[in-house]
Image (cartoon, grey):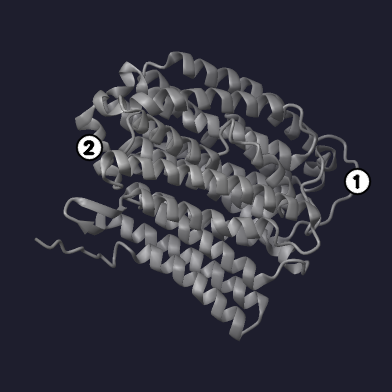
Amino acid sequence: MSLVQSVDNVALLPAYLAAGTAVLVLLVDLLAARAAATVAVAALGAAGTALGAALVGAAGDRRTFCVGPDCSWLWTGRAALVAVVIALLTLGVLALSGPLLRAGRVPVGEYCFLLACAMTGGVVLGAAGDLITLVVALETLTLPLYVLVGLRRGSLPGAEAAVTFFVVSVVATTITLLGAALLYAVTGSLHLDRLGAVFGVAGEGLLDLPLATVAVALVVAGLAFKVAAVPFHAWAPATYDGAPLPVAAYLSTASKLGGVVALLAVVQRALPATVTGPVLALLAVLTMTVGNLVALRQRRTVRLLAWSSVAQAGYILAPLGALALAGGRTADARAGAYAAAVAYAVFFVLLELAAFAAVVALRPADGDGGALADLRGAARRHPWVGGAFALALIGLAGLPPGLAGLFAKVTVVRALLAGHAGWLALVVALNAVVGLAYYLRLAATLYAAPSAVAARPARTVVVALGVATALAVVLGFAPQLVLDVAAR
């Protein structure tokens, strides 16, 4: 009996829009050869991708590339949320890139094309229904970033950061693919839902096979690299600090969100919680603790934000680590944990983008993040930019009036308590207190006596900073909306 594979082009529309943006950017750069036109096409394409993803998501869940019950493309509310956020992050990073592109050290066409390619990978990633689609989408998101990190002409730190990022990422991808191959050898399937069904039916008997346990561990370890979880984090601070500031912003937001989505997909739908739960709980504790403690000693702005990003990854992983405990095996506790992880990731990337936008606004065009001392008195010179920066830092710390960050941490703690992981909730609370030290120190530096006169921020950067801050504030007043969409 032959099986016919179904194709739903409406479900694929967001991916078409994202990939079409990359192709149009190449054509416009080739035919028009005008930087403004190339950037405008990339920006319009990102906005159109976000709109298309939202409209298709509002129409209901859709599936395509299906053979029988197994589908490789699942367009759900969560996939739409991820695609919209990735597209908006791309649009925001394009706005942040204005000073960098005007400085002339980065080729505009290649820069916009690579960003559009990365956006395409992020859009596909949220809808991936099998391990092959998941890994290919994740690499489509990541591969352009290798080039973007080192694309700035004459930058030795950028070249070193790109090589570091490339070598470590290739190793992580190899580990993930090896784990996927072993999973196929054990189960005979690569579709996530089918893998979950196999592990559910076979139960502990399948896990008694050493090959199955090794396969699960390899997949989790490979994907943990993408979120910069300890001990797979060493690449992040050096890469962020060596990359151009807008690229570092994209790494810290879109790339990390992609890693979270990939890890969440395999943990929620494919791999047994009895194996992944303890591993993720340990990774969460190590990640948030190491990230916060090392961030206390940082004196460079981007490195502080990088280590802060490592710590935030620990908070995202914490709800997933609670699933192995007795309370975490109930359907309601699982749904709450998954929704908490996605919601926290969404709020984090908005606040992180706002923080990086403020750094771009306060630093010279085409400059690096500089030292913390270089930002001394910045809020006195530029009250609105400094105020938005301080609000983003307070939100990342989880304090009011940064309601988005406060809600995110409360959601994580509530999910942990619902999963009977009170000890992990206590670790999260203690680490949040440690994080206050460096977030508030940086915020206080912004309002200290000025040390020098800074250049006026670029208008596009100020707009991106304002929009990111406003989104974080607005969603902070409507947190249940994000949770409801993330739970779908």
The answer to whether one can see residue 390 in this image is no
Instruction: Name the spot of residue 210 as percent of width and height, x first.
Output: 36, 28
Left or right: 300 in relation to 275: right
Instruction: Name the spot of residue 118 as percent of width and height, x first.
Output: 53, 59
SS category of the residue bearing label 2:
helix
Q: Quadrant of residue 335?
A: top left
Mark earlier in primary sequence (1, 2): 2
* Residue 38, numbered label: none
Which residue is found at the position 43% from the left and 25% from the top?
A: 321
Which residue is found at the position 23% from the left and 36% from the top?
A: 198
Q: Quadrant of residue 279?
A: top left
SS category of the residue bearing label 1:
loop
Q: Residues within 10 Å of mark 1 (few under 14, many from 20)?
A: few
Residue type marked 2 = Ala
Residue labelled with disc 1? 452
Residue type marked 1 = Ala
Instruction: Name the spot of residue 228 as percent of width and height, x first.
Output: 58, 38
Q: Is residue 223 above or below residue 117?
A: above
User: Which residue is outermost to the left?
Assistant: 1
Instruction: Name the spot of residue 199 as percent of width and height, x first.
Output: 26, 33
- In the image shown, does 444 or 29 lie closer to the viewer? 29
The answer to whether one can see residue 29 in this image is yes
Left or right: 218 in relation to 353: left
User: Which residue is outermost to the right?
Assistant: 452
Residue labelled with disc 2? 197
